Image: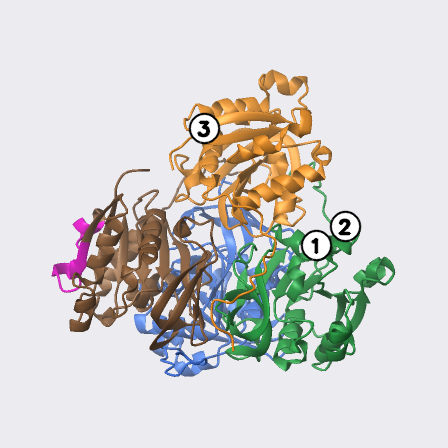
Chain colours: A blue, B brown, C orange, D green
Amino acid sequence: MDSIIRVTLWSEDRHDAAVMKLYPKGLHGTIAEGIESLGGFQTRIATLDEPHQGLTDEILDATDVLVWWGHQAHDEVSDALVNNIQQRVLSGMGLIALHSSHFSKIFRRLMGTNCSLRWREIGERERIWNVAPDHEITQGIGEYIEIPHSEMYGERFDIPEPDRLIFISWYQGGDVFRSGCTWQRGNGRVFYFSPGHETFPIYQNKQIIRVIANAVRWAKPRIRVGTEDCPNVTSSLEKVT
Amino acid sequence: MDSIIRVTLWSEDRHDAAVMKLYPKGLHGTIAEGIESLGGFQTRIATLDEPHQGLTDEILDATDVLVWWGHQAHDEVSDALVNNIQQRVLSGMGLIALHSSHFSKIFRRLMGTNCSLRWREIGERERIWNVAPDHEITQGIGEYIEIPHSEMYGERFDIPEPDRLIFISWYQGGDVFRSGCTWQRGNGRVFYFSPGHETFPIYQNKQIIRVIANAVRWAKPRIRVGTEDCPNVTSSLEKVT
Amino acid sequence: MDSIIRVTLWSEDRHDAAVMKLYPKGLHGTIAEGIESLGGFQTRIATLDEPHQGLTDEILDATDVLVWWGHQAHDEVSDALVNNIQQRVLSGMGLIALHSSHFSKIFRRLMGTNCSLRWREIGERERIWNVAPDHEITQGIGEYIEIPHSEMYGERFDIPEPDRLIFISWYQGGDVFRSGCTWQRGNGRVFYFSPGHETFPIYQNKQIIRVIANAVRWAKPRIRVGTEDCPNVTSSLEKVT
Amino acid sequence: MDSIIRVTLWSEDRHDAAVMKLYPKGLHGTIAEGIESLGGFQTRIATLDEPHQGLTDEILDATDVLVWWGHQAHDEVSDALVNNIQQRVLSGMGLIALHSSHFSKIFRRLMGTNCSLRWREIGERERIWNVAPDHEITQGIGEYIEIPHSEMYGERFDIPEPDRLIFISWYQGGDVFRSGCTWQRGNGRVFYFSPGHETFPIYQNKQIIRVIANAVRWAKPRIRVGTEDCPNVTSSLEKVT
């Protein structure tokens, strides 16, 4: 229960100068530092332009929870890698999809829907309401998190009804969004969390980092099993006459 | 509300002699006749070996609910067709997946999981318990349906938690199965129903046909919309300062 | 399917002069007229100060869907009546709880939770976002409903996770709310809808009336059954050795 | 996270001679010993015929998870105590309802339904299938638990759709049952587990005890909060013009 959780942070890492000024270590570097500072995590960075798009079988074998940040290059992620990650999640690995990763291949694959939403980028205020104060993911967060300048992600968000709705966001411009949602898929847990943006310093917000750390703890595997492929059980447990 | 529902029954239609003896019109033909006899449906047959694997855009445009029966040839269904059907479901078309279609590409795509199960084929008795007597799908069915000889499909069934669990099956050999389940995906409704087999006369059972007919009525579209692709809404509804 | 739906609108009917000026026929009278104008409904009014608090067995027997509006006098409703209504819902009768009825005895009884929320009454703007465009309840509504002056009902709303979340409200003052939610209880359907207030003309809004009418159609019984009391089934379906 | 969990086992403790022969320490004593042997729990026994029906405020204040076993005397539990326990659960305390406690006042209160089921007592075989192998409650359990002689509890079970369905039971006599189910209520977690009977030695089965111990760990509070009573928040977070 209390062993170190092995977290792999995957990122496109195609940041331009504006992003690098705000996040000199990249978004993934900032998140990694943030959650490590809370204790109990061992982080690793993986990026799109590395060999095997950053995720070999060895790395995935050593990953308890995968945190995903994709934005412009969703289509470049290979279908073979998406298949591999999907199978890992179904086998028990946790997945945290951040912000624009709602439109990543792996998140859409696990949801079965398009995961479309409406968006607007005018730097408006966002208030992330905690609607599940009992949940592991919201511990230490309080009633809401306020983000002074945010990208708006608005309903209707095309997702299956979440198992638990954790956060609902209010936007100054008049929109709302289911900004934190959980789902079970196979033996794995999935959390989507919309706050986070490449040119607003949202991942430097300590409450945002706490949510991600909490979510990683919540999503760590309880079991890891192999893929089942419709086994034929020839003999019955009870006598059939 | 009361207009005729346009149902397309898709089948592999690779039946061997044993199947054809039992179902001279094919499984799909038997189901089509069965539900038409209950009134309110206009059915059409589509099969794998037809041009476009049976499902052109014109046919899909004219389909309210698609009933799917695949078995041995899941892999032969083209990914392009699977993508097309998925988008239709998300847009509002209903989908009923029967029996071995739990392992079809389209059902697995919509679920996001492997949909593996355990199975055994010794002709044992199955009793399908109705656990949702209020639901549209169980109207006229009573407490249970008994199938004298059935293929066993057993837990654990690798599916996302259903929105509603409709039927649980008991098997003589000692197993249980979530044999009727509903899910929402996008604007479309999905129902999986496990009873049905190519060499037991299960689709000649009037209660089984009634369940399928009820499910088609339940799954018919309330709306049909186009695919959304993350629209950018540039102006806000409220003034942002 | 197409028979007239018998709707009973229950109200405290303890309106003061300000309310009566806005709603000369009472809130319930306005709602009754509104939904009747859409066709397919036969309405009846029942109020707290009538004999039997407005709801005899005869009236409940002749009610397909009960619409509830309580506010200041929740505690005056007798426990015997609450028990009776609960059993009717479990037997198949629909229940629509409006606005301040979140704190009614019957709604709390069916939820099992306190149904507390935060509130504020400064006449701010509310925008009710439709997050379930496929659902029967949102047909004809569009993306959102705007209410110029509303009472704020805000999270956290202490309810069990809804079966479907239908509406999320945005408030000018910075809050959000799960303003439309469905639950199944026994054989009956329950819908909570928060918009509606005694001194803002919200029930004169045609979209609000359409939501209530849609919800009544959705909540009408598919079956009406007696109360089950743990029947002992002495003989088994299968031989036990 | 790793502190000792304080468990109160409440029981009617109206066992007759047959029960006392099988369970010399009472059902509750056997369960208490069983889970204590697994480590991490501090147990306390409370019974109906003690002052305050066994549960004073002091005891409830010192209870993380309450395990409930009632059978013949459900009606004797005072409504005041039921109200008190309900508020504790909504505030964060866990509740495990065992076997015939499906018909206890507190379980029915939290569900909002009648919780009726069908039953038969002929000592038939029960096989409890694990349909949620990833869940905390099923760790160490394997595919199923077999009970040689059991009381049959059968569908339809009148409960709200569980948040997670954990176990489905198969019975030799031909029935099935949702025998392990979880629900969230307020800030508290609820688990119902049907196996267990006063004259079959089911609570001496190590797997059954493991399930109960796992469930207690799962249900321990993450937060404990006071009861909210619809607070009026007079000032808004955003300026309302």
Circles 3 and 1: CB distance less than 8 Å? Answer: no
Q: Quadrant of the C terminus of chain D?
A: top right
Q: Residues within 10 Å of mark 2 (few under 14, many from 20)?
A: few
Q: CA distance from mark 3 to mark 1?
A: 37 Å
The residue to which callout 2 is attached is D79
Instruction: Give the farthest residue toward the right.
Output: D51
Q: Is residue B46 magenta?
A: yes
Instruction: Pick whichever, D204 or D123, lies toward us.
Output: D123
The residue to which callout 1 is attached is D105
User: Image check: A56 left or right of A202?
Assistant: left
- Image location of residue D152, percent across then percent down: 57, 68
Is residue B168 shown above or below A226? Answer: above
> Start and end of the magenta stretch?
B45-60
Task: Look at the numbered disc 1 and give the secondary structure of its residue.
Answer: helix
Residue type of the residue flagged with mark 3: Phe
Work out whether disc 2 and disc 1 sit on a shared chain: yes
Please say whether residue D40 is visible from this viewpoint: no
Q: Quadrant of the N terminus of chain D?
A: bottom right
